[in-house]
Amino acid sequence: MTIEIDDSGTGDLVGDAFIGFYRKKSEKTIFKTLPVDLFKGENWKNKMPVKKTVDLVKEGLKELNFDKDKEKVLLCRGNIFDEVRAYFIEEGILYEDAIIEGKLQDAVEMRLVDHLRNDLGVRSRNLTIKSGAKRYFVLFNWVSYDFYRREKYVKSGFKKWNTVWRERAIEKYEEIKNNRRQNNRY
């Protein structure tokens, strides 16, 4: 028997991140949340997302009644799982680094998109389950549109946010604000 583990949102600009678990035989899927605050300030510097992921993996495997003597884990290759790998080796848990595709990947990415839409209010039709540059700019534009209210949702521990993107978001916000003022005059 096999359990797959994958993540979503750990590299996205805003919002919580998620760890998904999928037991193939029973087709059971569960999710655990890494709150956005883990990706900020001292939490980020102290690698709290990576540390918390170990706790979430322990919880998820327990909920799925994982039996390390009879089962193995297919683990996403992402670096959010670096300490999980060390834990698995310590505990003698059979695992394999894998590219997670299909049901679990779609489900965990959909969990992220649902969070962005329903919890944060991202309305762009261009927001999809496909990660990458396109999704980054959908989220960047969303933050920029109402910067001072939405900055709290940004994973501000990311180096480029503080050295490049934060300033660009403020500039874009000011531009949007000025355009609104001009359009309201007519």
Image: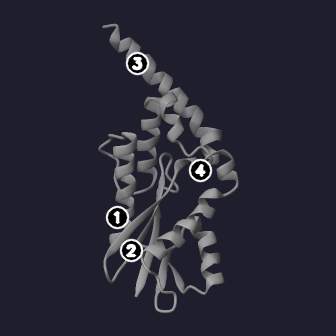
Rendered residue at 38%/74% (across/down)? 22
Looking at this view, is 63 or 186 the one in front? Answer: 63
Can residue 117 be seen here? The reply is yes
Going from N to C along the chain, the mark reached first, 1 or 3, is 1
Marks 1 and 3 in Cβ contact (< 8 Å): no
Q: Relative to 23, does residue 69 appear above or below in the rendering?
A: below
Q: Distance between the residues labelled 2 and 3?
A: 47 Å
Rendered residue at 45%/55% (across/down)? 132
Determine which residue is flagged by label 1.
Answer: 107
**Which amino acid, mark 4?**
Phe
SS category of the residue bearing label 4? helix
Q: How far apart are marks 3 and 4 (CA)?
A: 33 Å
Rendered residue at 63%/70% (across/down)? 83
Residue 22 marker: 2
Q: Which of marks 2 and 1 is in front?
A: 2
Residue 133 lies, in percent from the top left, at 46, 51
Residue 39 marker: 4
Rendered-image quadrant of the N terminus: bottom left
SS category of the residue bearing label 1? helix
Rendered residue at 53%/83% (across/down)? 95
Residue 59 lies, in percent from the top left, at 50, 70
Determine which residue is flagged by label 3.
Answer: 179
Rendered-image quadrant of the C terminus: top left
